[in-house]
Amino acid sequence: MTNLAAELRAAVRGEVGFDVTSRALVTMDASNYRRVPLGVVAPRDADDVAAVLEICRRHGVPVVARGGGTSIAGQATGTGVVLDFTRHMNRLLELDPGTRTAVVQPGLVLDRLQEAAAPHGLRFGPDPSTHGRCTLGGMIGNNSCGSHSVAWGTTADSVRELAVVTARGDRLWLGQGWAGAPEGLRALVEGELALLRTGFPDLPRRISGYALDALLPENGADVARAFCGSEGTLGVLTEAVVRLVEAPRARALAVLGYADEGAAAEAAAGLLPYGPLTVEGMAADLVRSASVLPRGGAWLFVETGGETEGQARARAEAIVRAADVVDAAVVTDPAAQRALWRIREDASGTATRLPDGSEAWPGWEDCAVPLARLGAYLREFRGLLSSHGLRGTPYGHFGDGCIHVRIDFDLMTEAGIGRFRRFSEDLAELVVAHGGSLSGEHGDGQARAELLPKMYGAPMVALFERVKGLWDPDDLLNPGMLVRPAPLDTNLRFSVLPREPVPVAFGYPADGGDFSAAVRRCVGVAKCRTTPAAGASVMCPSFRATGEEEHSTRGRARLLHEMLAGDLVTDGWGSPEVRDALDLCLSCKGCRSDCPVGVDMATYKAEFLHHHYAGRRRPAAHYALGWLPVWLRWVARTRTAALVNGLASVRPLASVARRLGGIAPEREIPRLAREPFSRWWRRRRLEGADGDLVVLWPDTFTEHLSPSVGQAAVRVLEAAGLKVALPPTLHLSAPPIGAGRSAAADPLRALARRNRVCCGLTYVSTGQLDRARAVLRRTLDLMGPVLEAGAPVVVLEPSCAAALRTDLPELLHDDPRAARLASAVVTFAEALERYAPDWTPPAVNRPVTGQTHCHQHAVLGDEADRRLRRAAGLTGDLTGGCCGLAGNFGFENGHYEVSAACAEEQLLPAVREAPDGTVILADGFSCRTQLEQLAGVRGRHLAEVLAAALESDGRLP
């Protein structure tokens, strides 16, 4: 391997990675399979590709071409050298609106092509649900389709010419009329015309096997089309000329509700004469919330196009009238359409968890049958599942007879794997009996290639092997796929994982307390690799900043998987590779909500750091920033905030403090408040509100760094008629709650100040989980009277609210009080909406900009905030993404560039482009600090904005 790596480094201009991290990141795609490669090469051009093939051929090492790594049948994994085209060969080389063609490199992400074509009224027809991260090379290799295939066909229908390098170094331009055909291919085809004319089912979604019928003379002897769907087994694609189609100027989406999926499937064929762009189906067992959908147990998503919105709507309404539905809705608003399509597009991820939380897996993801047989096939498919004791949630391209499904296979035990094989064999026979194709979109790979003889028969499969031999006589390219396949029940990704749960600190309630099951959530659909962030989404800011797979949620999950496997990453919790990949995780929790399968990398990172640094010296920042509540409490207790601020303003002293504390030298040290919030609370004149009691949480940031936020919140809450109290500071047998002061009696106040409630956020984010548990148990002791009173707990800092809602019950899963406190937590806006519903906020009547806090987006939700802003006349939407400071992350040494890049993605441009008079909203201290330090702008908490407006209205003194 050393000689191979050295030769590759000497011969290619692109990066060559034979290190543990590079290999671990590509052991899996989005399938059930895993192979450990020798190394990864990111070629810069076709010359690099040819050099890699020549060297690997000399060494007898196989080569696998890889795009976005979202293949579902295992064809993007291999044991030799993996070619990663996403790093360099990812450009759009040419776009010609006149001929409606584009020249692309294989690593170009589909959405980038769509964005370039859109100003010309054009688009690439096929659009898989992974369009934000799948590549054109991968689409050509799999002959991908997507939801619009009823209108624009498969990728093969959109390919004109292909530039290919063969395993022996020939550079071919493939096209019609035998253009680019390797020697002997034409003679082979012409000798088997009868077999080729009778051996292929007539299906729009027949993807299985090689498309040799494209080489028939009546089909134009199209070598480029025949190459599509060959899964990297015939040659390596380096460039493609593709056709574009005219995009409708306007679209409408008809969502049709049916009693069940059988009724929806049988109705699909009757809609095709109306010329829809899509006919997509899904059933209720796949939808997290059907509140936004029409009534029904299953739905068809039928999209129509037109020159105007009215024309598109009229076509959609005609379809509704013609369809025998339970209920229906027609949507023309683009934002509402996107929200509905996200339900469908996320299905490949959400389907991996059944409604009861059980795991479900691909493997029989996309069989296709003639449309007239779809309803009958679905019923028999459901029956076959039941007969094997399996469950799944079918959905997919009903208009093309193509069904996706994830099934609750047990791929961990010998008995479960045996059932997986028996079911696969039976299902293959069922599909063939209906005249279908084993693959209708994602290719055969290892998952289905072994069963191709059931579909095609031995003579056709033998012909496939002869064709492979002409293109690749050394069997160098992606061996074990399509021809001479590996058994479908070998190389399973879970076979290397521990069979017993590993000891962990968090409870992982959604995964049965099993950290391995939590890591298994990542199936590789790679929504975390989508760039730029879509709408209000957050995940994954570090990947968007660096573009490196190891900084994506999927990449980190892959490394954790390999850590648990132990044969590539061999250091377990001590792994430096895993530590380095997690280092740039912002703990924004965006993946917790944006990942279709709910991967929570912030929790996994905290868990890893907890184990990694057990018995070891931690980075300085873990002590300086992780123990921030302690240091700030000492400053408040000694009343030395002014002194600390003065010392921090002396540059040499501040530089020394940053260096000792592991803080980035580019960062300014925030100024401490001279008077903490709780001290202001104790000396203030009581307002005497008599409404419902709410307990205001004095988080560390509000207490010591932004007391004005707490003061504003108190004034607004009391103006709304609520009675505000702070949590107790001393654990007494029956301490008073709601007296308007600290719960401890005045003579005990000095002692009481030694105990403050804390959400443990800074300890969790730095992986100091033992300390976090101790702090949280003390907090639960102090909050006993609040829990007994059943009072809501208003938390102003979103990250602290999220920690109490999620980290607290998951870390103290053995303490019932944790769940009670978590359920009592409300945001500022939720408190006003729930407990002062008749209160009218002041009319601010100004536009707003800023960013929804990433933890609020991921954990808390911002619906109440949106309604409160509308009621106050604060117009406009906040951006998505993450501010990049993210608590301790942006302050830590070595993180500044990534932190600033995250802010530059959405937040800072939105602030710069805001018109004069715009309110800059930033509820999180980190967000406000980032705005101040990078843009010189002061962001304000919503409570501060409302309090100022109340003062202007004369409703507050």
Image (cartoon, rainbow, N blue to C red):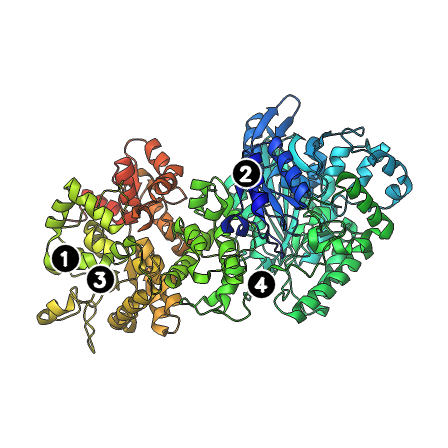
Q: Quadrant of residue 392?
A: bottom right
Tag 1: amino acid: Ala
Residue ID for mark 3: 723
Residue sitting at x 25%, y 40%:
938
Tag 2: amino acid: Arg
First reached walking from the N terminus: tag 2 or tag 3: 2
First reached walking from the N terminus: tag 1 or tag 4: 4
- Would you say 284 lies left or right of 601 here? right
Element class at badge 4: helix
Q: Is residue 862 visible?
A: no
Residue ID for mark 4: 496
As measured in the structure, the alpha-carbon distance from the residue carrying label 2 to the one carrying label 4 is: 31 Å
Please say if the residues under marks 1 and 2 sit with CB atoms less than 8 Å apart.
no
> Which is closer to the viewer, label 1 or label 4?
4
Q: Which mark is residue 9?
A: 2
Task: Provide residue 587's location: percent of width, then percent of height.
Answer: 39, 53
As measured in the structure, the alpha-carbon distance from the residue carrying label 4 to the one carrying label 3 is: 57 Å
As measured in the structure, the alpha-carbon distance from the residue carrying label 2 to the one carrying label 3 is: 69 Å
Q: Is residue 144 above or below residue 780?
A: above
Task: Provide residue 507's location: percent of width, then percent of height.
Answer: 43, 68
Q: Is residue 936 visible?
A: yes
